[in-house]
Every structure is written in structure tokens, then in C-alpha cells.
Amino acid sequence: MKKYLEGIKFGLLLQFAIGPICLMVFNTAKNSGFLVAFTLVLVVALVDAFYITISCLGASNFLKNKKTLKLFKAVGSIILVLFGLNIILNVFGIKIIPGFSLNPNYKNILLQGLIIALSNPLTIIFWGTMLSAKIIEDNLSKKELIIFCIGLVSATLLFLTSVSLIGSVFHSFINEKLTSVSNILVGLLIIYYGFKLYFTNTTK
């Protein structure tokens, strides 16, 4: 239980570094309500669990190759920029990604969530580095590492569920004009994260 609580505590600290996933969850809750956003949260948590698992298996070493990492970063950056542009243009009734709208349903939010959650290859390197340091620092056994990682995924669920609830409150109270402005701002921020991903220096 101690390692599980440590995982939650550490995971919650990491969640406060607001990124594109948090913005997507908030925007989905604001536009489509809590239940659709919560579906997205579950998808993101599953992707986190997947990334953590393959990081533990050493897959982060694969991305330490500069050419491989550059390719994955470029693909991830393009995905984020396209998502951001799609959100902005949707405000004006224009779609550049078929099936991806500002008001997603349970069917397309699954695909939408998978694509954007998987778009950042640096997450694998981050989890691999962080978990390696944690194993060395605390001399974690295999069982303790598993429990700690379950705590990390639980933190993702707790934090993003809270974001969904906040977004759903906005869904109930803000008018159409403010919603449009908010969607444009979210789109711009996601585009920013796309460029930030590509130009992030991972050699230090």
C-alpha cells in the first residue's frame, strides 16, 4: 500500500505539468460533457499503462537512437499540430481530419484519444529514465515496482477525471461565443505543444 500511495503522490505531481492531453480532456468535457470526456480519460490511462510497461521492459533504449527519435518526434508533432488546427477550423465549420469534431461521441473519442495519447514518443524515454532512477534510488523489487506503477496510472485517472468534472461545469455555464474562443485557445496551445515536442532537445 505504501508504494501504491507513493506512486499516486508522484504521479499527481507529474500531472500538474499541463500538456495537450489535459487540454483535450478539458475541451472534450466542455464540449461533450463528462461521460464522453471520462471515456477519453480511460483511454489515456491505458496508454500511460502501456508506455510505463514497455519502459520497464527497456523499450526506451530503442528511442535513444537519434534518427529514430527524430522520426517519432516529427510524426508526433505533425499529429498534434493537425489536431490543434482541426479544433480551430472546426469553430468555423471546417474539418481537415474527417471524423474528428469538437463534439465527439463515444465511438470517435476512442480513436481520437489513442492517437493523441500515443503521439509523444518522449513519454517512453521519460518513464524509462524516471522508473530506472526510482528502482536504483529505492531499491525496488519487481512487486514494489508494479505496485508503484499502478499508483502512477491511478494518479492519471484521478487528475484527468477532476479535469473532466471542471470541464463539464464549463459545459453547463458558458455560452456559444465563449466556447468558440475557448476552443480556439485550446487549439493554439496544442499546436504550440506540437512545435515544442519537435524542437525539444533530448541530448542533454
Image (cartoon, rainbow, N blue to C red):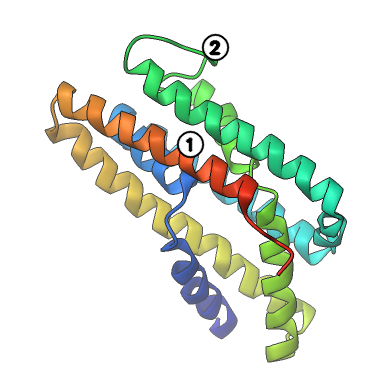
Residue type at mark 2? Answer: Pro
Residue plotted at (41% across, 52% down): 160
Query: In this image, 88 relative to 83: left or right?
Result: left
Secondary structure beneath disc 2? loop
Residue at figure coordinates x 33%, y 54% from the top left: 162
Considering only order in the chain, which callout, 2 or 1, is on the residue closer to the N terminus? 2
Q: Nearer the viewer, residue 27 or 38?
A: 27
Q: Is residue 12 left or right of residue 77?
A: left
| Separation (CA) of disc 1 from disc 2 | 18 Å
Q: Is residue 140 above or below residue 63?
A: below
Dot 1 falls on a residue whose secondary structure is: helix
Q: Nearer the viewer, residue 62 or 37?
A: 62
Q: Compared with residue 134, is residue 76 higher up or lower down, i.e. above or below?
A: above
The C terminus lies in which quarter of the figure? bottom right
Amino acid type at image mark 1: Ile
| x, y percent for residue 169 | 20, 41
Above or below — where is 56 with respect to 94? below
Q: Nearer the viewer, residue 204 or 155?
A: 204
Residue that appears at 48% across and 45% down:
21
| Circle 1 residue | 191
- The residue at 42%/55% (across/down) is 18
Residue 165: x %, y % from top left: 29, 46
The residue where tag 2 is placed is 98
Q: Is residue 30 left or right of residue 202?
A: left
Measuring from the top left, give residue 6's x and y in whole percent: 53, 80
Tell me: 105 left or right of 169: right
Which label sits in the foreground, 1 or 2? 1
| Number of other residues with Cα within 10 Å of mark 1, as a class: few under 14, some 14 to 19, many 20 or more | many
